[in-house]
Amino acid sequence: MNSHKHTNEETNKMSCDLYQTRRKALYDQLPEGSFVILAGYSQKVRSKNIKYHFRQDNDFLYLTGFAEPDAVALLCSDKTKDSGFNYSLFCRPKDKAQEVSFGERAGIHGAITDFNADEAYDIAELEAVLLSQLASHQHIFICDELGRFSSRVMDWMNHQRNTASFDTIKQHLSVTPLAKVLHPMRVIKSPDEIAKIKAAVKASTDAHMTVMKACKPGINEAELAATFNFTIAKYGATDVAYPNIVASGNNACCLHYEENCCTVEDGQILLIDAGAELAHYASDITRSYPVNGTFTREQKAIYSLVLTALDSAIAQVKPGASWNRLHETCMEVMAKGLLELGLLSGNIDDIMKNETYKRFTVHKTGHWLGMDVHDVGPYHDEQAQWRKLEPGMTFTIEPGIYIPLSATDVPEGYRGMGIRIEDDILVTQTGHENLSVKVPRTIAEIENIMAK
């Protein structure tokens, strides 16, 4: 046997087993008689017959591994199977002409052989098959992020009740968003998922360092953004996890600045928030540094304050710590520092009580990280308390201070500056791992690498 073919077959089987394990873990949490509808994304048109690059819905990918557009999966109870449920996959059929233009399709046969579906159908058959399978179930769980079937769900629910004879037992179905069960599952990452996140972070680490070395007065933000993308491509990353934010000077005071069109100027701070996506997993790293490679006194003061806040929060990461305590720590450190610098006035207790620090610290300081850059999953437990950290959680911590040019009551040296520092953190059995620590983050490290 061809050894390469044998390796691919083993890899495919491992992938199929992974997704089947996830489907079973999900279905085991659902009540008896549950029927799951998973809707994948459709491809969007950019202009006329030119389409956007397709990116599958992450919930759909998480449970099926199927990355083609216009797909739907159904899970329904089947006591004849060891798993306890039947898995049907609906997709586009093989089409030679379309595949020549737009790439190979799995087709109906491939949905079974390559993606482990128990049954597979042409997507055109969805409604007929769905209604026949739904007839013996009581609970519908639906995952349809873009509302592809929102206008049809009530008809599907009521089909049996409206078409059965008057003396037949009627079904009164319930509909529940699948996210209620699925998204908590996605918060704790498996070793395979952690490895993929680390790979994305590694690509981003090299890219951030390359951009840092390339930054100089007179270069355009767009060129730096392209430098980041060029570098991650060397690692096989064909896309970013979110649009690059390459913001110089006052542009950094817009949190999701995406224009990336300005020439960076001597004396400004450049804020770059960019992360590679690799194998459908995201990284998310932010660094801020002087365009000319040397911090001014005011820039150094704000940067040191933000880095101290970040490191103080990271130091608290361990199993059992409260999620919100990380944000509170960042706010306490930055509020005290801003008071000491004279950018806030009053006493620290009043500042914390009245949250006057929010004038310069305008966002939360972290989020889950995974298949989505702002990954899914609750931040509170079932008692509405802040969630406790557990091994396998991955998230960002990203404090920032923003002082726009319009803040004319602030000394001029501080104005037109946005400084955010963001690292990707993994909770381990005994504490934490800073996955992005190799991206220069201290003042000495930054000035040294930029001098070279």
Image: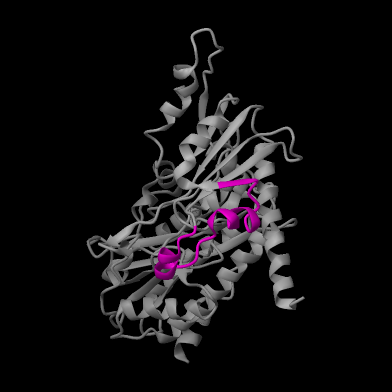
Question: Residue at the spot x=50%, y=87% of the render?
Answer: 448
Q: Is residue 436 visible?
A: no
Q: How many marks?
A: 0
Q: Is residue 128 visible?
A: yes
Q: Is 366 covered by the magenta stretch?
A: no
Residue 97 part of the magenta segment: yes
Residue 445 placement (x, y as % from top left): 53, 81
State the extent of the magenta-drawn residues as a range. 94-120
Q: Residue at x 40, y 64 (%)?
A: 53
Indicate the position of residue 308 as horizontal and vertical percent values: 53, 64
Quadrant in the picture for the N terminus = bottom right
Q: Residue at x 38, y 83 (%)?
A: 215
Direction bottom: furthest residue: 452
Is residue 239 positioned above or below 227 on the image? above
Please tell me whether residue 191 is drawn above or below residue 276 in the rendered image: above
Q: Is residue 351 left or right of residue 72?
A: left
Q: Specify whether 108 is left or right of 272.
A: right
Give the colouring mode of the picture: one colour
Could you say which is closer to the camera, residue 443 or residue 80? 80
Counting from the top left corner in percent of width and height, residue 381 is at 60, 36
Name the foreground residue: 393 vs 109. 109
Image coordinates for residue 76, horizontal then vertical, percent: 62, 35
Q: Quadrant of residue 11?
A: bottom right
Q: Residue furthest front?
A: 96
Determine the residue located farthest toward the top in the rendered image.
167
